[in-house]
Image: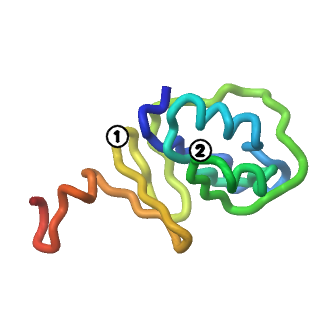
Amino acid sequence: PGHGRVLVVDAGASMRCAMLGDMIAELGVRNGWAGIVMYGCIRDSAAIAHMNLGVKALNTHPVKSHKKDAGSRDVPVAFGGVSIRPGQYVYADEDGILVSDMPLDQVSASGVS
């Protein structure tokens, strides 16, 4: 279960295939994930855009991946000049992604509220 969290995937900036498609995205919706940040490509972007799931990726690619490895979970990742650790908060809009150590609703202009 996602419990409103964001799944962050370091796919090595690969442009060879898509690491996320509509079927996995739909599982994310059903399991309560708020979003997915993919450091790589996705496919089925038109279908994913209509889902109640925020998705940010480097690009789209029509070829799906070969699932060789389950990957690691609850580990820090670093890409795009940013390190993201488990437990941090991830916010995104059309212009980019922000990572915070605490929920932004607990931060005021002068610091922590």
- Residue 51, given in percent of the width and then of the height, sits at 65, 48
Amino acid type of the residue that numbered disc 1 sits on in the rendered structure: Gly
Q: Is residue 94 left or right of residue 107?
A: right
Tag of residue 13:
none
Return the residue found at the far right.
63
- Residue 35, given in percent of the width and then of the height, sits at 53, 47
Rendered image quadrant of residue 83: bottom left
- The residue labelled by disc 1 is 87
Q: Secondary structure under badge 2?
A: strand
Cα distance between the residues tagged 1 and 2 = 15 Å
- Residue 58, given in percent of the width and then of the height, sits at 68, 62
How are the residues colored? rainbow
Q: Residue at x 42, y 53 (%)?
A: 90
Whether tag 1 and tag 2 are in contact, CB under 8 A, the answer is: no
Q: Is residue 62 left or right of residue 81?
A: right
Q: Which quarter of the image is occupied by the C terminus?
A: bottom left
* Number of other residues with Cα within 10 Å of mark 1, as a class: few under 14, some 14 to 19, many 20 or more: few
Amino acid type of the residue that numbered disc 2 sits on in the rendered structure: Val
Please count the marks in the image: 2
Q: Secondary structure under badge 1?
A: loop
Q: Residue at x 79, y 48 (%)?
A: 18
Q: Residue at x 67, y 47 (%)?
A: 11
* Number of other residues with Cα within 10 Å of mark 2, as a class: few under 14, some 14 to 19, many 20 or more: many
Q: Residue at x 80, y 51 (%)?
A: 43
Disc on the earlier residue, 1 or 2: 2
Q: Is residue 59 left or right of residue 64?
A: left
Q: Is residue 33 left or right of residue 14?
A: left
- The residue labelled by disc 2 is 9
